[in-house]
Image (tube, grey):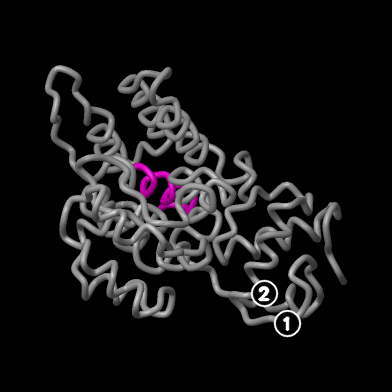
Amino acid sequence: MVLSLNDAGEAVKALQRDLNKLGALLNIDGHFGEGTQTAVGDARAALAQPGPATIADDALIAALASAPDPFAAVTAPGATFIARAEVTSAKAYRATYRFPTWPSATSGITIGIGYDLQFVTPAQLRADWAGVLAEPALARLSVVTQVVGSDARLGAVRDIDVPLTGAMSVFARRSLPAYLTDVRKIYPQVDALSPARQTALVSLVYNRGARLTDKDPAAQDRREMRAIRDLLAANDLDAVAGQFESMTRLWDPQKLGGLIQRRRDEATLWRAGFAPLQLV
């Protein structure tokens, strides 16, 4: 079998699912478009598979099928969901996030999928990124760990290339397990949930943190997160989706519409799983 540009059907869907195990961030739409074509080239490089970068042949399809799930708890669809919530798409990653950024005045220099160097030591950086980034790049990035970013610090590392497949590898192997640990601290029932529901909770904590006390008492900004804790403890699982939706009250749709959509998508995950979001 050979799959190439403009092919369509179930075989393409299967290919897209397997490409997402390597972090392709694809919609599972069954259409072999330019995004799938780029992902095939990335997969050949990541798996050291010879052959044309624009087509998927039997050897590549078999290698992708045998590739492990990047993080079994949330599965490849879950990792794809959270990463897309952070960077939107593979195309957007390459345009905006492939090189280090300084997202805000209070953040550190950030690489990959939201990997903020302010919160890691040089040793942690090397443990996470060895094999993905070369030692000269790690040495330069080490200088901007454990500090808030600045224009000068960003300028010193701005040219370091962090390919999507490498970024997703670190995201799945290092970042997601750490955030699942944070989820367990406030929602200890998480491990008994389906992968889609685990994904919804990890996405929430990845985005908002694990704090349950209000920073703004007037706004009750953590009210819904506390309600989720109580609903899980009472095994009232169906009611949790409504708390994701209720959180949308906190943000101005004109300024932070992406956060509102993220909460709605988490509610969809909770109710209906990955399929409505074209993740399976």
Mark 2 / mark 1, whichever is N-terminal: 2
Q: Residue at x 80, y 67 (%)?
A: 55
From the top left corner, tell me how far across and down residue 247 is, in percent: 34, 26
Q: Is residue 40 left or right of residue 107?
A: right
Q: In the depicted view, which residue is nearer to us: 156 or 161?
A: 156
Task: Say above or below: 261 vs 253.
Answer: below
Name the element at disc 2: helix
Asked if residue 131 lies left or right of residue 69, the reply is left
Q: Quadrant of residue 116?
A: bottom left
Residue 262 lies, with reference to residue 179, above or below; the image says: above
Work out whether residue 72 can be spotted: no
> x, y percentage for residue 76?
54, 60
- Neighbor class of circle 1 (other Cα within 10 Å; few <14, some 14-19, many 20+) is few
Q: Secondary structure at mark 1?
A: loop
Find out whether residue 148 is within the magenta segment. Answer: no
Q: Position of residue 73 (x, y in %)?
A: 44, 62
- Number of other residues with Cα within 10 Å of mark 2, as a class: few under 14, some 14 to 19, many 20 or more: many
* Magenta stretch holds residue 200: yes
Quadrant of the rendered structure where residue 21 is?
A: bottom right
The residue indicated by pointer 2 is: 44
Amino acid of disc 1: Pro
**Vertical placement of 170 versus 110: above or below?**
below
Tell me the number on the disc at residue 50: 1
User: Who's the residue at 36% across and 23% down the image?
Assistant: 246
Q: Tell me whether circle 2 and circle 1 mark residues in contact (CB < 8 Å).
A: yes
**Amino acid at circle 2:** Arg
Q: Main secondary structure of the magenta part?
A: helix
Along the line of sight, which residue is nearer the eye, 215 or 100?
100
Magenta residues? 193-204
Location of the N terminus (image quadrant): bottom right
CA distance for labels 2 and 1? 7 Å
Q: Position of residue 183 (x, y in %)?
A: 28, 51
